[in-house]
Amino acid sequence: MSETGEGDHREFTRVPIKIEVQVDSGGKSIFSEQTRDVSMKGLFMLCQDHALEAGAVCDMVLFLGGREEGIRIEVKGMVERLTPQGMGIRFTEIGLESYEHLHNLVLYNSQDSHKVEQEMKDHMGLKRRE
C-alpha cells in the first residue's frame, strides 16, 4: 500500500508502516503484530479475529518499539470496516502527547513531509478547520 496519491481525496496521508497495536472494546481484547497503514485519522490493522463489529467503539494502544518498552500512542476509535485481512479503525479522540507522537510517526514515515504539515495546518486536531 502506498501513500495517498493524486487521485485520492483523503483528508490525511496514509503511511505504510508495520507497528503492534492492541484494541479493547466491550471486554474483548485484540492484538495485532502489525498495521498495514496509519494516518492522522485512523489505521488499518491486520488480524484474522473479527471479534468486533463495524461501529464498535474501542480503546487502542499503538506500540512504537514493542510492547515492553518504547512509546505508546493511546487513542479512542471506532471500527469503520472489516475485511478478510483485518479492520479499519477511525480515531475519535487522542491526548496531546499521543497526538504529537502520532504526528511525528506519520511525518517521518511519509514521502512528502510538506504535504503532511499542510494537512495539519488545514485541521484542528482530527477535524477539518471550518
Image (spheres, helix red, strand yellow):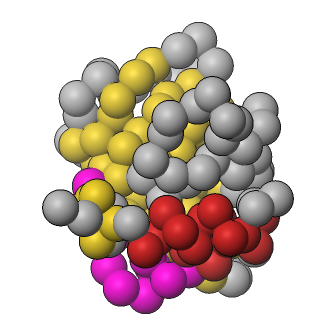
Specify the quadrant that holds the C terminus. bottom left
The single residue placed furthest to the bottom in the displayed view is 97
What range is drawn magenta here? Answer: 92-101
Find out whether residue 94 is within the magenta segment: yes
- Residue 94 lies, in percent from the top left, at 32, 70
Regarding residue 21, the answer to whether it shows in the image is yes
Tell me the residue at 72%/69% (across/down): 113
- Residue 8 lies, in percent from the top left, at 58, 31
Tell me the residue at 78%/37% (across/down): 2
Camera-nearest residue between 4 and 19: 4
Tell me the residue at 53%/69% (across/down): 118
- Residue 9 lies, in percent from the top left, at 50, 35
- Whether residue 33 is situated above or below residue 122 in the rendered picture: above
The single residue placed furthest to the top in the displayed view is 84
- Whether residue 101 is situated above or below residue 21 in the rendered picture: below
In this rendering, would 117 be left or right of 68? left
Specify the quadrant that holds the N terminus. top right
Find out whether residue 47 is within the magenta segment: no
- Whether residue 28 is situated above or below residue 91 in the rendered picture: above
In this rendering, would 21 be left or right of 128? right
- Whether residue 5 is situated above or below residue 128 in the rendered picture: above
Tell me the residue at 69%/36% (across/down): 5
Regarding residue 47, the answer to whether it shows in the image is no
